[in-house]
Image: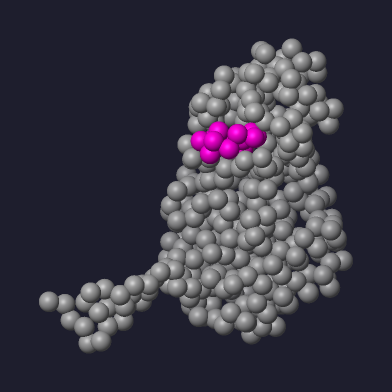
């Protein structure tokens, strides 16, 4: 990269090169994109020692910065997590290429034959915190969908992201694709984020992935369209007809598997008829597992709970904390979710299919689950290989944003010398 005197100059240069790369990727051969991703996976494994050394620098920076345990967990890499990153890359590589897919086609009475065909969005800007694996997930998914991408990782993952980005670029080089297809902003300066949000001439969509502060900033200030979720305030409603074994297994996994991810359960809503039977059992199990349970007046009679405050309803803890309250029935549970939820992921535990159907029909969260851990709220678990984020808006993309969701469409219209009367 040539010397540039200012952040605006730097970002303008990155944007122009991304736009040029996107013009090539729009019709790149599917086999070449697959080859680039597979090669990148090999480079990550071969350079794993260097990547982990870079991650150690980031972890030291994070400790000095006073990052929470949840944020440090998101930041940390080890060989097992790198294997997961590589598996995700290979899974994306193996997916059918979405570009050029015919979504629908028909022939009009005029003789016009019309096709609606998937096409890349163009240039995607991804702004993220902590998780260095987002560098790979975002780069891979954007490439698969024929988009160029500008990555701006968090200051805490600076070294890890750079090491992983180098592997992606080498994969592009090996496959003969433009190296500017996946660019990483080479500065910790926060002015680069503000600049990205206004680059309407070169960036087609922004995807923020991080905490409430980052996402809120992007949603407030972006002039570029945004795919995002602000918070993952995930509820589990335990119905009167829930199976006790299912409740215990699902709730413990949903809360404790990884507390720092957006699919982690944050609030239990328990039907009054089973509050002090099944409800008591699952709360005791959570406490035994080290979870702080902030309970309403009814459940606060259970030994080991902490009295809930009004602020606990609608709280995203991202920690070993969960709120719990008794509700009168399904309607009351859904009313609570509508008031305090974030339209991300919500779950019902019940053996009554009709009750489950009502829950999943009448609520409007991006992801609704029945008898399954909310930790499955993840693009990889949905068969997308990886995800660039979860979108809770209603325009264009919603839920896990994979390669297919990173495309738009165009109409191809064929006539035979057709003229309109």
Residue 128 at x, y = what percent? 63, 53
> How many numbered discs, if any?
0
Q: Nearer the viewer, residue 69 or 343?
A: 343
- Left or right of residue 54, residue 6 in this image: left
Residue drawn at (66%, 13%) of the image = 297
Corner quadrant of residue 328: top right
Residue 32 is one of the magenta-drawn residues: no
Residue 6 at x, y = what percent? 56, 63
Q: Nearer the viewer, residue 373 or 370?
A: 370
Residue drawn at (78%, 46%) of the image = 73
- Left or right of residue 247, residue 9 in this image: left
Extreme bottom residue here? 417
Corner quadrant of residue 146: bottom right
The residues colored magenta run 347-359
Residue drawn at (47%, 36%) of the image = 362
Residue drawn at (49%, 40%) of the image = 361
- Left or right of residue 337, residue 301 in this image: right
Residue 240 at x, y = what percent? 64, 25
Residue 357 is one of the magenta-drawn residues: yes
């Amino acid at each position: 990269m040539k010397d540039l005197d200012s952040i605006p100059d730097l970002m303008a240069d990155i944007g122009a090169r991304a736009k040029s790369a996107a013009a090539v990727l729009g019709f790149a051969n599917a086999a070449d994109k697959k080859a680039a991703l597979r090669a990148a996976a090999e480079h990550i494994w071969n350079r794993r020692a260097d990547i982990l050394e870079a991650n150690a620098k980031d972890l030291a920076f994070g400790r000095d910065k006073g990052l929470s345990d949840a944020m440090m967990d998101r930041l940390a890499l080890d060989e097992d997590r790198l294997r997961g990153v590589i598996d995700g890359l290979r899974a994306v590589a193996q997916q059918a290429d979405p570009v050029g897919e015919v979504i629908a086609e028909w022939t009009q009475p005029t003789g016009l034959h019309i096709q609606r065909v998937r096409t890349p969005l163009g240039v995607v800007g991804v702004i993220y915190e902590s998780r260095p694996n987002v560098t790979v997930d975002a780069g891979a998914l954007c490439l698969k969908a024929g988009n160029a991408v500008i990555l701006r990782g968090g200051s805490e993952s600076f070294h890890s992201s750079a090491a992983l980005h180098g592997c992606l670029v080498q994969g592009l080089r090996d496959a003969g694709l433009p190296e500017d297809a996946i660019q990483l902003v080479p500065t910790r300066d926060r002015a680069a984020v503000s600049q990205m949000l206004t680059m309407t001439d070169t960036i087609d969509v922004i995807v923020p992935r991080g905490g409430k502060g980052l996402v809120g900033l992007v949603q407030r200030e972006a002039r570029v369209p945004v795919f995002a979720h602000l918070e993952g305030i995930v509820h589990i409603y335990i119905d009167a007809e829930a199976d006790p074994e299912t409740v215990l297994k699902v709730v413990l996994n949903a809360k404790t598997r990884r507390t720092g991810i957006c699919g982690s359960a944050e609030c239990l809503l328990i039907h009054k008829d089973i509050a002090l039977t099944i409800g008591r059992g699952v709360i005791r199990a959570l406490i035994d597992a080290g979870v702080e349970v902030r309970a309403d007046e009814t459940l606060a009679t259970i030994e080991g709970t902490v009295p809930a405050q009004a602020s606990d309803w609608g709280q995203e803890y991202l920690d070993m904390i969960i709120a719990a309250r008794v509700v009168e029935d399904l309607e009351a549970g859904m009313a609570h979710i509508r008031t305090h939820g974030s339209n991300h992921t919500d779950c019902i535990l019940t053996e009554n299919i009709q009750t489950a159907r009502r829950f999943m029909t009448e609520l409007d969260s991006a992801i609704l689950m029945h008898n399954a851990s909310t930790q499955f709220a993840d693009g990889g678990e949905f068969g997308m290989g990886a995800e660039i984020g979860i979108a809770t808006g209603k325009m264009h993309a919603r839920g896990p944003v994979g390669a297919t969701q990173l495309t738009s469409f165009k109409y191809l219209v064929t006539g035979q010398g057709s003229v309109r009367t």
